[in-house]
Amino acid sequence: MSSAEDARKRIEELRALINYHNYRYYVLDSPEISDAEYDQLMLELKHLEAHHPQLITPDSPTQRVGAAPLEAFGVVEHRLPLLSLGNVFSGDELFAWHRRVSNLAGEEGLDFVCEIKLDGLAVALTYENGSLVIGATRGDGYRGEDVTLNLRTVRSIPLSVPRNAPPRFEVRGEVYLSRAGFKRLNEQRAREGLSLFANPRNAAAGSLRQLDPRVTAQRPLDIYIYALGYAEGAAVPDTHWERLEYLRSIGFKVNPHNRLCRTIGEVQDYYREWAERRESLPYDADGVVVKVNSIEMQSRLGTVGHEPRWAIAYKFPATQGTTVLKQILVNVGRTGSLNPYAVLEPVSVGGVTIKQAALHNEEDIRRKDIRIGDTVIVQRAGEVIPEIVGPVVSKRTGNEQVFSMPSHCPVCGAEVIKPADEAMHRCPNSACPAQAFEKLKHFVSRGAMDIDGIGEKLCAALMETGLVNDIADLYYLSREQLAGLERMGDKSASNVIQSIERSKSRPVSRLIFALGIPHVGSETADLLASRFHSLDRLAQATEEELLSIPSIGPKIAQSIVAFFRQEGNQRIIRKLRQAGVRLAEEVPAEPTELPLAGLEFVLTGRLESFTRQEAEERIKALGGSVGSSVTRKTSYVVVGKEPGSKLDKAASLGIRQLTEQQFLEMLKGSQPA
């Protein structure tokens, strides 16, 4: 059997395994293997595809991400309208809808399917001959945006389906962001000095509408499939409930909380249950969707306006309250961003007393027409930061004041700037005390230099006393200086000094992240460290060099170059160097220093000592390279059992052949006889 045929079979086997484990992990939430074992399967597949690019297919698990950024989204015509639902807000309204539907249907005993109404974005996914070919947003219900490349990055969306699926079909689902995922995303954006998303739905929408799929791939989007749109070339069940079960059986993620209800009373019970338990869900939900179960009955009932008659959204009571907005204040983040927030008359919402709410930026305040002195509607859902939905305009007295961002930094007095491509106003003074304080908190945090014993209060004390003016000053503190601070004894001071000393040897990736370079999060810091190995080499990098690194775009590249050009940052790095902070990693040995450097190997036949992949990894680790075919550039052909045509090609070209034993000796450092 040829090497290409072996590779094809192994690639198919790996794809099936990875798709199965993706389904177990992302759809069933019941993994069977460890992350390390999964990563090993993916690495093997990537390796095989790299050596056999002709075998790469669009539905391979390796092809979820990698497309170039788009200039604009295309338009997709929905074959069947993707309509929005009408709403009811009480039991009386639900029963009135039920009477109308029963009268129109001419039947009393209708079955219903009840589903949790996720607060996300509706999408339509089209599959053709087993592969995902189109993914589109709802849009106006008749035409949506083509976001196929972005939807391919959502791990719970299968890129391919079993062969017994219809030749062409469409499913519909809701893309969403879990509360935990939303919290992590906003925490990362805060560390990077970016504006925060207001809620999970906005975050999901912003993530799905990125022109660069690589950005979407970094966001923890998920999906629940809630309907089969249409199917061609195969029979499908004739009830909505059975269709959901069918979609689940061919690999789609369907909400396990769906329920088949035989009466409208059971529907009401389902609603009451989830109205009480909604906070226990890992995602935001704003109601229950009720659908007539019979597909034939759905067709008979049809639509009215832009809404189907056969379905309704029964909305939960909103977790909102009204209060008075007393003041709008502004704090300054570590990257200089000016962040407005509302000071409120305390109000209880969902059992939590709210005194402040984020306002994000001036554009958001103006869009909502929020004014100082307004009576405002405050909303809270799960762990989301409380937000102001908008003003109660009917309660205005005429004494309300329109807010404008300050022209000068409220802390240092520097003139505020607003970059043309950003929503945030910024203080350009890198020596601003507020920025220095936030930078210090970030620098000592667990994800950065991880300096135990230094929290927000100690950071404030160090800056107020003048012991620390920038992050590098930490490394020049003495035990005596710390012991002299209020509530800081000798033992605590000694512990902090030891922790500071330990932090000097943190990996360079940690230091890059800790410096607080705008738009550089921990993952980007890891990429930069693995590419440049030292802070000095990174500081000298050009935009072109930075743009050659996957996942780094123009904005990040420009930010990095600008950061290292600033004299204040250069001074801090000099101080870190003088204090003995680790600024460089041990650079991996150059290929010329390795025993197999400059040699190309081709493997043929089956080896006894290790697998083909293990042999290739051993060769590469020692500086050699592995070819897929024998050419005049081949140094050695390693011959295992049942060799293929490569052996004949090697003989015809006079290429040196190695037995497996000779190959093993060569790996140990001996030259072949």
Image: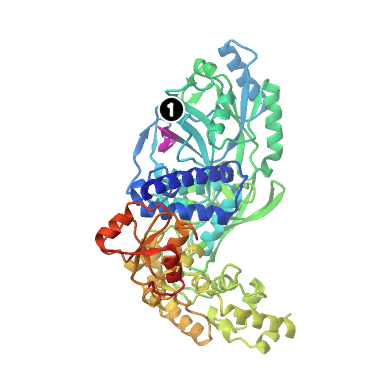
Compared across the picture, whether 212 is left or right of 183 comes to: left
Q: Which residue is drawn at 62% across and 28% down?
A: 114
Q: Residue at x 42, y 37 (%)?
A: 131
Looking at the image, which residue sits at the far top?
A: 106
The quarter holding residue 623 reads bottom left
Q: What secondary structure prevails in the magenta region?
A: strand
Q: Position of residue 448 (x, y in %)?
A: 56, 70
**Residue holding disc 1:** 81
Given the image, on which type of amino acid does mark 1 rest?
Pro
Nearer the observer, 346 or 663: 663
Coloring applied to the structure: rainbow
Nearer the observer, 194 or 48: 48
Q: Position of residue 257 (x, y in %)?
A: 65, 35
Residue 489 visible in the picture: no
Residue 33: say if magenta.
Answer: no
The quarter holding residue 544 reads bottom left
Q: Is 417 drawn above or below residue 196 in the view shown?
A: below
Mark 1 crowdedness (10 Å alpha carbons): few <14, some 14-19, many ≥20: some
Looking at the image, which residue sits at the far front?
A: 673
Residue 134: say if magenta.
Answer: yes
The magenta-colored residue range is: 125-139
Compared across the picture, whether 149 is left or right of 100 comes to: left
Q: Position of residue 602 (x, y in %)?
A: 35, 60
Q: Where is residue 670 in the image (x, y as percent from the top left)?
A: 43, 75
Q: Is 151 drawn above or below residue 260 in the view shown?
A: below
The quarter holding residue 116 reads top right
Residue 478 visible in the picture: yes
Label 1: which secondary element: loop
Nearer the observer, 49 or 301: 49
Q: Which residue is drawn at 56% across and 13% down?
A: 104
